Amino acid sequence: MHEDSAPLDTDDVSFAAASDVGDSLTDDLRARFKGELEPGERLLWAARSDPPVTPLAAGYYVSIAIALVCLGVGIAILAPRGNRHSVDDSTMTAGLVFIGIGCLFVIGLIAAWNNRWSERRRLSNVCYAITDRRAIVWAPEPKGDAIRVQVVARGQLRNLVRVERPDGSGSLEFSGEGDYVAVHWPPFGFMHIPEVRRVEQIIRNNLIMSEQVPLS
């Protein structure tokens, strides 16, 4: 066994070996990992997903500009000028329409921002583990507080692909034999983890069986 994949004895509740590869694990994650392991199964690595903050799309800035313009025009129309302290019905209607449109854009922007960060929090709560028997993914469901646990057993992991960023973090994409792994957002695997090359080596050393070439 490769020295990077030295097993972690579950009788010793120290997760130092796991945190050498993943991030620091909270007490609830320690309990989750320990509770998932079968008798005699050894934890080799565990971590939580750490998705990067993605830049806002151009459409978001366009929406901000539209909201500011509409609100500004509406306020300008309704604001008193000089000695005129009242506006006629048509002017008031136009001003209210612009303000209403601006408010709708503001509400939409707030909702989009909230959804964006809610999804990032959800992805940040995705947890991964490698044992000497399987790869495990804990993923919160998009709605509710349920957790979906997906497993690929030793010898059934296929099509391992590493996507690595310059800082050494990245993702490992893979599938299960017979395509039995339920996928809710492609691709499936360990997304946004540190030291992705090292984690790939742990998987290759422990979960991927050597292919046997038949004799002719």
Image (spheres, rainbow, N blue to C red):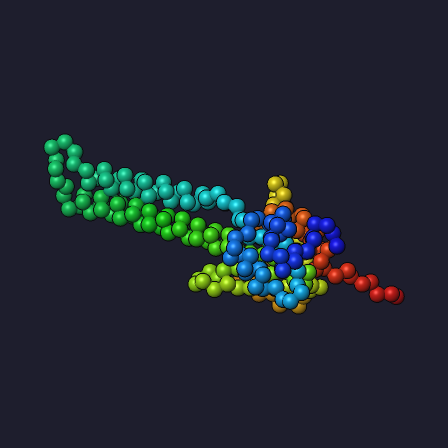
> Who is closer to the viewer here, 166 or 59?
166
Give above or below for 89 relative to 216: above
User: Residue at horizontal 60%, vertical 61%?
Assistant: 136
Farthest right residue in view: 216
Asked if residue 163 can be seen in this view, the reply is no
Q: Where does residue 173 sit, x and y in percent of width and height? A: 63, 55
Give above or below for 82 relative to 198: above
Quarter of the image for the N terminus: give it. bottom right
User: Residue at horizontal 67%, vertical 52%?
Assistant: 200
> Who is closer to the viewer here, 48 or 110?
48
Quarter of the image for the C terminus: give it. bottom right
Q: Where does residue 134 sit, x and y in percent of width and height? A: 65, 62
Farthest top residue in view: 82
User: Residue at horizontal 31%, vertical 40%?
Assistant: 69
Tell me if 82 is positioned left or right of 140 in this view: left
Give above or below for 24 relative to 149: above
Tell me if 99 is positioned left or right of 149 in this view: left
User: Residue at horizontal 37%, vertical 42%?
Assistant: 64
Q: Where does residue 186 sit, x and y in percent of width and height? A: 57, 58
Q: Where does residue 163 sit, x and y in percent of width and height? A: 63, 49
Q: How many marks?
A: 0
Asked if residue 57 can be seen in this view, the reply is yes
